[in-house]
Amino acid sequence: MEFLGGNNKSQLVDNVGPWNDYQIVDGSKPDDVVGIRKISDGAEGKIFTPADLMALPNYLLDCKVDSDGDVKEDE
């Protein structure tokens, strides 16, 4: 069965998708790193953290954010 005319021949209930490639990294101690890691990178793979998300550019805003997540003042 094709779904919405696409090329993917999987059934809709097969749960096929990129969401199966990532895992949530959590900790119980205050200094533990939390975020998302790609499963194929293994236990030593890079963890994408909320600080990484904040460092991404947001073209809808005029302000800039530094690597610590603090807003830089425009000069």
Image: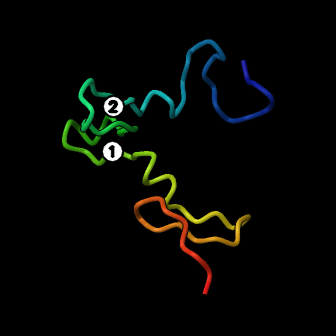
Near mark 2 (Cα within 10 A), the count class, few <14, some 14-19 or many ≥20, is: some
What x and y, as percent, mark residue 75?
Answer: 60, 87
- SS state under label 2: strand
Q: Residue at x 29, y 39 (%)?
A: 33
Residue toward you, 13 or 36: 36
User: Are the residues at dot 1 and dot 2 in contact (C-beta closer than 8 Å)?
Assistant: yes
Can you tell which mark lies on residue 47? 1
Horizontally, is 49 left or right of 60 in the view? left
Residue toward you, 46 or 31: 31
What x and y, as percent, mark residue 19?
Answer: 50, 30
Q: Residue at x 43, y 54 (%)?
A: 52
Horizontally, is 46 left or right of 13 in the view? left
Quadrant holding the N terminus = top right
What residue is disc 2 on?
A: 25
Horizontally, is 55 left or right of 25 in the view? right
Amino acid type, label 1:
Ile
Callout count: 2
Q: Residue at x 47, y 59 (%)?
A: 69
Near mark 1 (Cα within 10 A), the count class, few <14, some 14-19 or many ≥20, is: some
- SS state under label 1: strand
Q: Is residue 73 above or below residue 33?
A: below
Given the current orientation, which residue lies at the most extreme left position? 44
What x and y, as percent, mark residue 29?
Answer: 23, 28
Mark 1 vs mark 2: which is more N-terminal? Answer: 2
Given the current orientation, which residue lies at the most extreme top position? 13
Amino acid type, label 2:
Val
Q: Residue at x 40, y 45 (%)?
A: 49
Mark 1 vs mark 2, CA separation in Å: 8 Å
